Amino acid sequence: MKSKQPTQFTVADYLLTRLKQLQVTEVFQIPGDYVKHFTQALEHFDGVTAIGTANELDAAYAADAYARTKGLGAVSLQYGVSTYSALNAIAGAWVERSPVVVISATPGADARNMTNMYQVLFHHSTGNMEADQEIFEHVTIDAVTLSTSADAPTIIDELLINALTYQRPVYIACYKEVWGEPCPKPDKKPLKARVMESVPADLNNAVTQAWSMITASKNPLIFAGVEILRHGLSDLLQELIDASGFLYTTTTLGKTVLDEKGDKFIGTYSDAASISTVTQTVQNADMILTLGAIITDDYLWYVQNKYAQTVICNDDGMRAGYFMYEGVRLRDFMEALIKMFKANAKTYPIKAKAPAQPKWPNPWKENEDPNWVNDDSKLTFNKFFQHSMKYLTDNKMLDKIVFTLGVSSSLYVATNAYGLYQNSFISSAAWQIVGFETGAAAGAQLGSGKRAIAIAGDGGFMMICQSLSTLAKYKINAVIFVMSNVVYGIEQVYVDMNAFNPGDQNKFDTFDILPEWDYMALAQAFGANGIRVHNPEELNNAWKTISTTQDKPTLVEVVIHKKDLPGQMQRLGAE
């Protein structure tokens, strides 16, 4: 129970009230003396809970995942030493469109005057007291530092509106004393995203050009990305699929923009890591309607081969073939296309042009490394997902979980999973940071209300294993699967894939070899359950144990031979 709240309403209380109105009921934090007025206000504030994390990346990854599941997240950090440590995570939130509010405090007016008079270097400062804001301006849509409480309500409101509108992080710091200064209370109406309207002429021209490409095509396909989720356009996407009859796929980052239960979903497209039917459908498409997608270098084949046949609309504008239309918004464009399909449903049978949905194969067997196919006494990456997905499906658990993945071999294998529910696949597929999945677990579970299932490489887990302690501290029963092969497998693939060939003469590079950890001892030290599995039977038993665990996290070491190279990674490495 919170202690009695101070009677004076402050700038910190104003921000917390606005966050609470926007359903932000947890703020992840690292304490510090400069930011003490905010952290003390948070401790006493009714309806918003402070989640004290093990380190800054833990806090920021959690806030990022929270934002992806709940619509907005917040992290409170100490000046300099803390904000700089969290910068990596906030850069990922910037790239992947996650609206995180970064809250901090700087040395106050007294410290600044002493610096000017006596050249005192205050702790945690580089000497440039504006450096924090200057750095975060590169990875936020808005960054401000309040030197006074004057106009604080207006500035805070504008900052939060920008985060909601652009689905990007924002940064707010105050001089140390300002968070504790008196402030008027906000009104009771929650803030909303600003309505961004298209330029009418641009929209009309864009739709006309797109429609001409659509009607001329014989094998059209919809390619959906993460901005559909971020801007709340999933229902609109479903309406467009229904109106057009087109099949659809998604980017890795955009996986689960819709429930993967519909009869138009062909599977996630992850370039060479895709299952063969998805690759063939994309290659055969002669018009790809790409909506809300962030196109990274994971999609170079698509860029190099389908550019002229692509209609693409996202936050950066719209392009139809080689024609550019900057003043077009994604929502407006989708709504206009839906009207076109409905208006032409009788005179032009678009639905007849869509190919039949390919029969979904067994993606795990298709991608299994031949050395391991017939050996059920061992687990491989594909066997792990094969048995885990079967257990989750058979026990009707898919609607109760959210996956978190950083960049690892598991990410590309996991893209082959089918049947997941909307917004249940959170990944660092664009920023591609190692370790994201473990830090993200707390935020994903608290934000979604579903159980977080993190699948980590052992190298990634080693970077941020302290997150397990945070989960235990708050009795969050998330599950961390560590794919324990004692090497940076995904790195070795791109250095020298021959290392995975059988035989001792094919060696891994020294820099890709990891130390061997006693994960069971670590789990016990951090207050988590620990399970080690070597084969499918042990994995299924682990899932049964996990299913009944309520009040603590579980760390599962999945023992995999270092030479196991899933087919997905083999194809990616061969490109």
Image: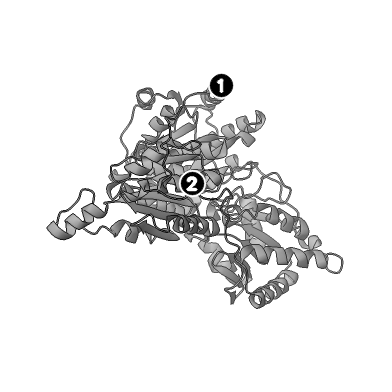
Return the residue nearer the eye: 570 or 36.
36
What residue appears at the point 57 percent right and 48 percent down from the top-left corner?
Answer: 188
Q: Is residue 267 above or below residue 400?
A: below
Say what amino acid the circle numbered 1 marks. Thr
| Mark in the foreground, 2 or 1 | 2
Disc on res. 548 = 1
As drawn, the residue found furthest toward the left would be 118
**Residue marked by disc 2:** 73
Give how far across and how far down residue 184 sits, in percent: 46, 50
Q: Is residue 219 above or below residue 96?
A: below
Quarter location, residue 388: top right
**Could you say whether the residue bearing mark 2 is in a helix, strand or loop?**
strand
- Please state if 496 lies on the left or on the right of 398 as rendered: left
Give how far across and how far down residue 168 sits, in percent: 48, 56
Q: Is residue 431 above or below residue 444?
A: below
Say what amino acid the circle numbered 2 marks. Gly
| Camera sees residue 551 | yes
- Please state if 68 lies on the left or on the right of 420 as rendered: left
Task: Say whether disc 2 or disc 1 marks the residue closer to the N-terminus.
Answer: 2
- Tag 2 near tag 1, CB within 8 Å: no
